[in-house]
């Protein structure tokens, strides 16, 4: 039903707030998921332009500075130098001016942290877990409004991704046995580098010490030089250095412990929480060792065969999982942004590695995303905002259609959640920082008062996981593709003379045969050539042993076969969401402040209706008991409809109560007053515009579909 | 909007299936939550009557058996004995007959396990986690249909409890530090008794060995005797014996290990998974030791102060939490029923311990629940079905209104989920089996092929947890109640002469004063009396030390104070749901089987719409490409609406595809066929009745609210 129809039906006055109408649509049915987001890009354009001016000014200052330095060295008359120095000072003044303007233009979210933290604490959005026991670093609890927002974000995620794409949602366990995570590489490589103070023995995270050291250096230095640019580049890669690279940097730059002592050589620390399953007390046994999963993805990979079967063997398809991930952070910090237990939402989209197109790509192809590819990170540091996803894929900036498609869908999801476009970018991973399983990766990063925060990863994991689990379990995790017509394919096949092989190699026979089978067709033909020409071939197997194969033992023949299908290990494109981080970013991005007449400044959260913790408050103008039946009727209707509402008939002034509901982002308020008793009307108020509208309870009743 | 209105609007023919109409209502708005459930109780009454007949027959056989034994002993003529033996045989025949009838009347859920397990495996409802690695006992994954049902059950739970009761939902962490669970009693008492084979050293769960032993005994014995009744009683209490009681029973009954060896004295094994937070390697430190929470409740208790503040200090109120619980079971078994990681949904309703009434009690007071109080468990084993909740609370069978209210709400929730009333009972805990924190407890148990399964606990935890956390943290977890008018209260206050106390007791002064303060008013008056009459009083403090107090040191006076509010530690009523168990029970209770004409028997799940994994399938009669646009339109409308649907345009016959959707419980199917191309109509099919209806795509479109 259109806004217009509803407007006519309810006979609302002209000019009624669009938000009010949307509320009615919302409570008439679940919110539509539009593939395109229509928010204006005004704010982004504004900051974009200022950023360009800032960059220009900086370049001019750098150029002029260099010129002055050259002149000074060259020994020209002092007067010539003086005029250039004056020009430099003028340029520096201009730069300072532009920097101030950019700061002023900076969105509220970069400046609101203290206010927001106060609000979050006061209204129990989230708080340190086990607070009365002194808290545990890196663990947070969601209080009532935070928990409700989390439920709504998860529900929207389900509709936006799982339902919209017909994904197969699964729910696996957090407890994961040792051998699964050994195969996935997490036992060996899910580590952070630690280092210890050589005097006190205290442990620190190596990359954080490096970052802090560089931050301090940059804060001390004035202006931009080659030196600072170099440091910035090192800082950006801080979490991707190897043990030896990190140690070298410590020594080269002179990084010390916070107490000013020398640091030990960094060493890896595994970030998984370890436990033991079952009553056995054998502490060394790997069969009872388990970890809390560091990602939900493995729970999908190990079930690939079942999922493909459930999907009737059809490819491509996607599976999804919402659930907890755990990471035993060495130094949790930045509130919700780096925690030890976190809700994740992951999608594993399985594709034919030779065909990473996506059937719905055209739906999003013309969207322009803020892209920050690796070459820009290593050069001018600029975000690209003027090319479409189609162009980005065609120019190979983004590796493939499916990756581009999901980046676009993520963009729509985040902006629907209330993230402002001007504070959103897609940053490509540098080659040095990619996870051990990934072959290309773009992070959706959101700008906050803590800087840019990685909230959604989009990784092309290729066939890494399925290949390794196949090897470890001898269970083929493969898909197949039927050709439209059978094809004639050439291949090289081995004919083995086991009567000779057995006596020659005894228990090693299988190993020898497997090693030969594993060779590519080209290699097999080369061996055949060796055998024909020299009569023997020396085979080196995986453990390094060598075996001499003679002509009569094996023969390789090129054969032609009619093949009607092809088996392949699927590639995986993985969008992976950190729900807690996204929610923190939403809170910063929707934080607003307003002065009301002569009153103190009041802050509120302009949360989109779809993720607001409670959709509607039901208030009474005073504590008069006669209001109760009307309030209960409205509350009852809301419950029937599944729309969350909050009754408040306390004695506080109506203004204070509105302020309280604004603070937790309730978009609508229905107020029962003395006129309600006379004519059966109530007031409907919208949070952001504070617009109020008088409607009949009967109409509210109708709206709420009795 | 009523069924009638929709029916008129859509011009459906008379006699259209009620389910079809309900579907339309469902997709028009979220399902209404009615406080009363209207399902017929026919099946319950039928089985109830048969059970009565069975009980009567058994009693007659027992009585006659006893009579025969007495006669035999008494030495009366053989002829007299013979006629009584014949009467006994007749009665035994009758009993066998009734037993057969009861077996036949037994709901399908007691007989469907093999079929259901096949179905669940074939359609990936759930399966062992890490299957390709050989699986891990006690860990299960939810596949696509199971995961979707789980999401719907959780969503219904939120609407039915959290939204309906304005509960404060929170979300805490699974990782819980040592000291929190030490306080709650779980570190010391969350244990199962284990025992080991004295020869092999293999470990077993003691209660399971006892149960298996008794089961074998009972299977061997014929009929009912005092001996078997005794054994049954022991079996019922198997998990509540102390270490010494268990050992005594082992020896008295002759319980042995499965290998026939003697068993060791049982010992407690803690069931919590242990891990370590942070990079410190100190394995003995309690500050870094953490456990995976065994229940979500503690996460609510430790946040009590914040929650009360969020609720503006008002009592009573309830908090709720949905999340994972963990239990390192010694011997996981029975599929989903006893697992190591499980989804829980817990409510902590905080009340004034002196007033456990509930404001909405009258809404449910006339409901008749199947009650199984402890006295019936220890006597005739009968379930009471004919008294109302009001009567049960008034007669003190159920301890208080709030406990009764939640039992009724749980009853409505479970029956709304598809649990059949005849297979549902509320069993009161025996005094011996109550958890360490509980003072009264009623389990909602559901009958399955595994017997009666505890799915929801309703415990009155009294002030246990808040009191202990207050002591451990010195943070008062209390609420207060304002009197309508200030009251004059008498109390005994101490006046201490510190100038004398200090020199007399030095460092023990505080201890002495605290010990005196802690005394009750009566005790203080007695001490005052001692001091007045004998001039001194010997005080024994908590560590056993004694101190002599003399007259001049302290004085106790009775004072009168105007008090306007009262502070108290709230009592807690806790309904606690095991989501996985409930889902397994729903699957058994909604399992149906039907023969279709000459075809093989087909099974399906008669899941209520509200928890069906997918609400609607969209099929085409053949793979003709012309159907695609219509199917895509319908799918698109469904997505907009947030109604889950599943496209299937595969080549399988329409009958096979209907059977597939029936198997996973999809309640409705829309089929596009050749007529659709001509006149724009489609078929709407209902799962249970298999009724079909032809409607215009345009109408489907209207229904789906464009």
Image (cartoon, coloured by chain):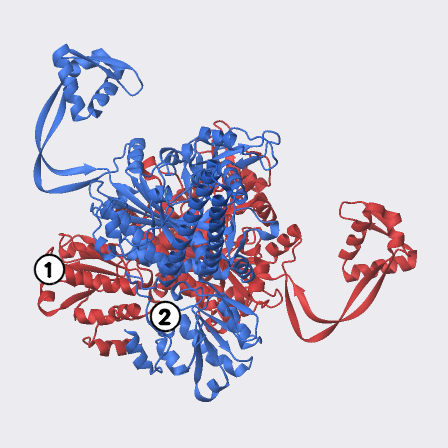
Chain colours: A blue, B red
Q: Quadrant of the N terminus of chain B?
A: bottom left
Q: Position of residue B517 (x, y in %)?
A: 78, 57
Read off the residue under disc 2. Answer: B32
Nearest to the observer: residue B321 or residue A430: A430
- The residue sitting at 85% across, 46% down in the picture is B506
The answer to whether residue B369 shows anywhere in this view is no
Residue at numbered disc 1: B626
Image quarter hosting the C terminus of chain B: bottom left
Q: Is residue B436 left or right of residue B259?
A: right
On screen, residue B352 above or below A317: below
Query: Nearer the observer, disc 1 or disc 2?
Result: 1
Residue at coordinates 54% horizontally, 81% vertically from top-left? Answer: A625
Describe the element under mark 2 as helix, strand or loop.
Answer: loop
| Disc 1 residue crowd, few under 14, some 14–19, many 20+, Cα 10 Å | few
Residue A606 shows in this picture: yes
Residue situated furthest bottom in the rendering: A678
In terms of image quadrants, where is residue B479? bottom right
């Amino acid at each position: 039903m259109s806004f217009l129809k509803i407007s006519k039906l309810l006979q609302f006055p002209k000019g009624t707030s669009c938000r009010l109408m949307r509320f009615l649509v919302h409570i008439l049915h679940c919110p539509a998921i539009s593939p395109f987001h229509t928010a204006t890009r005004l704010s982004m354009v504004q900051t974009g332009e200022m950023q360009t001016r800032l960059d220009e000014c900086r370049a001019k200052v750098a150029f002029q500075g260099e010129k002055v330095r050259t002149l000074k060295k060259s020994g020209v008359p002092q007067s010539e130098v003086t005029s250039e120095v004056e020009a430099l000072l003028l340029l520096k003044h201009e730069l300072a001016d532009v920097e101030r303007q950019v700061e002023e233009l900076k969105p509220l979210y970069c400046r609101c942290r203290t206010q927001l933290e106060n609000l979050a604490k006061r209204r129990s959005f989230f708080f340190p877990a086990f607070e009365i026991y002194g808290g545990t670093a890196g663990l947070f609890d969601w209080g009532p409004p935070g928990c409700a927002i989390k439920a709504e974000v998860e529900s929207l995620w389900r509709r936006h991704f799982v339902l919209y794409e017909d994904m197969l949602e699964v729910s696996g366990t957090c407890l994961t046995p040792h051998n699964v995570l050994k195969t996935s590489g997490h036992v060996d490589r899910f580590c952070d580098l630690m280092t210890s103070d050589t005097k006190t023995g205290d442990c620190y995270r190596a990359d954080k010490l490096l970052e802090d050291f560089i931050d301090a250096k940059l804060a001390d230095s004035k202006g931009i030089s080659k030196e600072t640019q170099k440091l910035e580049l090192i800082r950006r890669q801080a979490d991707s250095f190897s043990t030896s690279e990190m140690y070298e940097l410590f020594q080269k730059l002179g990084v010390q412990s916070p107490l000013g002592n020398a640091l030990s050589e960094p060493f890896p620390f595994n970030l998984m929480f370890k436990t033991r399953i079952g009553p056995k007390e054998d502490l060394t046994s790997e069969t009872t060792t388990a970890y809390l999963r560091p990602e939900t993805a493995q729970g999908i990979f190990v079930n690939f065969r079942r999922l493909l079967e459930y999907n009737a063997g059809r490819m491509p398809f996607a599976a999804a999982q919402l659930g907890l991930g755990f990471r035993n952070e060495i130094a949790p910090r930045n509130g919700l942004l780096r925690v030890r237990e976190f809700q994740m939402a992951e999608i594993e989209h399985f594709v034919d590695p030779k065909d990473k197109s996506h059937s719905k790509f055209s739906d999003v192809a013309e969207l322009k995303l803020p892209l920050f590819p690796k070459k820009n990170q290593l050069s001018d540091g600029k975000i690209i905002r003027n090319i479409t996803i189609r162009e980005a894929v065609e120019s190979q900036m983004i590796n493939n259609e499916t990756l581009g498609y999901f980046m676009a869908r993520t963009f729509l999801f985040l902006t629907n959640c209330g993230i402002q476009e001007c504070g959103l970018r897609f940053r490509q991973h540098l080659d040095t920082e990619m996870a051990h399983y990934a072959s290309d990766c773009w992070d959706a990063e959101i700008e906050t008062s803590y800087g840019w925060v990685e909230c959604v990863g989009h990784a092309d994991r290729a066939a890494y996981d399925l290949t390794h689990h196949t090897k470890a379990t001898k269970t083929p995790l493969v898909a197949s593709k039927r050709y439209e017509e059978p094809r004639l394919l050439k291949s090289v096949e081995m004919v083995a003379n086991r009567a000779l092989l057995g006596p020659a190699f005894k228990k090693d026979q299988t190993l020898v045969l497997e090693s030969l089978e594993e060779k590519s067709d080209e290699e097999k033909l080369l061996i055949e050539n060796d055998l024909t020409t020299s009569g023997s071939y020396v085979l080196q197997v995986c453990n390094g042993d060598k075996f001499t194969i003679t002509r009569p033992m094996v023969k390789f023949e090129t054969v032609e076969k009619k093949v009607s299908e092809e088996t392949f290990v699927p590639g995986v494109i993985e969008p992976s969401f950190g729900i807690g981080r996204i929610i923190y970013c939403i809170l910063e991005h929707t934080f607003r402040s307003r002065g009301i007449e002569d009153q103190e400044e009041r802050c509120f959260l302009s949360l989109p209706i779809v993720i607001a913790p409670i959709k509607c408050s039901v208030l009474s103008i005073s504590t008069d008991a006669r209001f109760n039946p009307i309030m209960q009727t409205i509350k009852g209707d809301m419950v029937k409809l599944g729309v969350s509402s909050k009754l408040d008939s306390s004695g506080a002034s109506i203004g204070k109560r509105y302020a309280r509901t604004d603070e937790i982002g309730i978009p609508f308020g229905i107020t029962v007053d003395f006129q309600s008793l006379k004519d059966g009307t109530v007031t409907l108020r919208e949070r952001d515009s504070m617009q109020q509208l008088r409607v009949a309870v009967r109409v509210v009743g109708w709206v709420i579909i009795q």
